[in-house]
Image (spheres, rainbow, N blue to C red):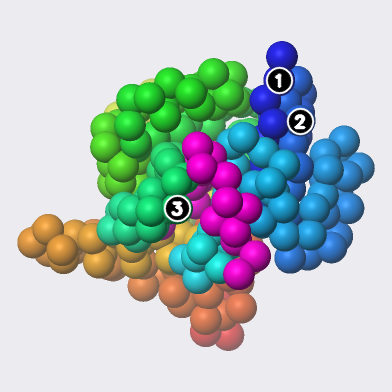
Amino acid sequence: MGEKLGMIGLGKMGLALARQMMADGHQVCGYDIDPERMKMLADEGGTPVPSSRQVAENSDITCSVLLSSSHIEENTLGPDGIVQAGKEGLIHVEMSTMPPAFQTGLAEKLAGRGIEMLDAPISGSHNKVDNRTITFMVGGTDEAFARVRPILEPLAAETTHTGAIGSGATMKVVTNMFVNSSTALLAEMFLLGERAGLSHDIMMECFRAGSVRGAMLEVMGPRFISRDFSPKGAVEIFAKDMGIAIDFAKEHGVDLKVVPAAREMFLRAEAAGWGKDDASRVFEVYEGKDQT
């Protein structure tokens, strides 16, 4: 028997997750500010509703995947947010990538309204949702995790309970430091190899044979080679996530060096108007094309 689930935020990630949840036999209602995304949910077999409050009214478990903290607060605590449904015992799964302090603060506010929250950020781009190779890092109580785990596990290659609320966000921040910075480093490597006369085939063969091999090489290498900048993980999201990491590191007395240097390149890509493009577009910043 499927669950009654709600999805707030029907962007590429949210809609893809809703689709897979329905494939698992769950009933999914959803809300997005964009009417076209609502129509897409209906076309997939979901039920669009006109507010986050109504998402909560029609669900036992709500999820949200949103870009900014202000959007999250509006849809959880605002006049049409999930708290207005008055459903004590509701579980809210916050899948957005946010600072750990924001997630713990939001969880405290929701708890005051009888709603238990899990912070469950996602590692992996929206295309990985379709083949279920994303991973969830989930912070929250054992009881809430046990309730939601049967829903999340089939959607992902790995679902890890990281500890108390906020620990999922912490793990995502640390993970993103590698993903974001290694994208910039790989761009440097491929460009220097090209300029020095190495072929793409030779570089890929040698990288795969040595310590460079891994998921980031397989994802970003072909995109750099083909100059494929179609959006999967956007430049603006990389820049945001690295900003979160820098601020979080300062809170803990860690003076980051690599992440800020990499972020400057993504900020240049964003300033050039490439914020919605794939993060691989940073390659053209290294080529100086953002200055032309």
Question: Is the C-beta separation of discs 3 and 1 under 8 Å?
Answer: no
Mark 1 residue element: loop
**Mark 3 or mark 1, which is nearer to you?**
3
Most extreme residue toward the bottom, as rendered? 292
Q: Quadrant of the C terminus?
A: bottom right
Q: Residue at x 74, y 36 (%)?
A: 28
Q: Secondary structure at mark 2?
A: strand
Residue 2 shows which numbered tag? 1
Place residue 187 in its image quadrant. Answer: bottom left
In x, y percent, where is residue 79?
60, 69
Q: Residues within 10 Å of mark 1 (few under 14, many from 20)?
A: few
Q: Quadrant of residue 100?
A: bottom left
According to the image, label 2 marks what residue? 27
Q: Given contact means CB atoms under 8 Å apart, are the residues at marks 1 and 2 in contact?
A: yes
Pointer 1 or 2: first along the chain: 1
Mark 3 residue element: loop
Q: Which residues are magenta?
A: 79-98
- At horizontal 75% and vertical 20% (from top left) the residue drawn is 25
**Alpha carbon separation for disc pair 3 and 1:** 26 Å
Residue positioned 33% across, 25% down in the render: 142
Q: Residues within 10 Å of mark 2 (few under 14, many from 20)?
A: many
Q: Is residue 162 left or right of residue 44?
A: left
Residue 81 is inside the magenta segment: yes
Is 168 rendered above or below residue 12? above
- Estimate the x, y position of residue 96 in percent, counting from the top left: 49, 51
Q: Which mark is residue 54?
A: none
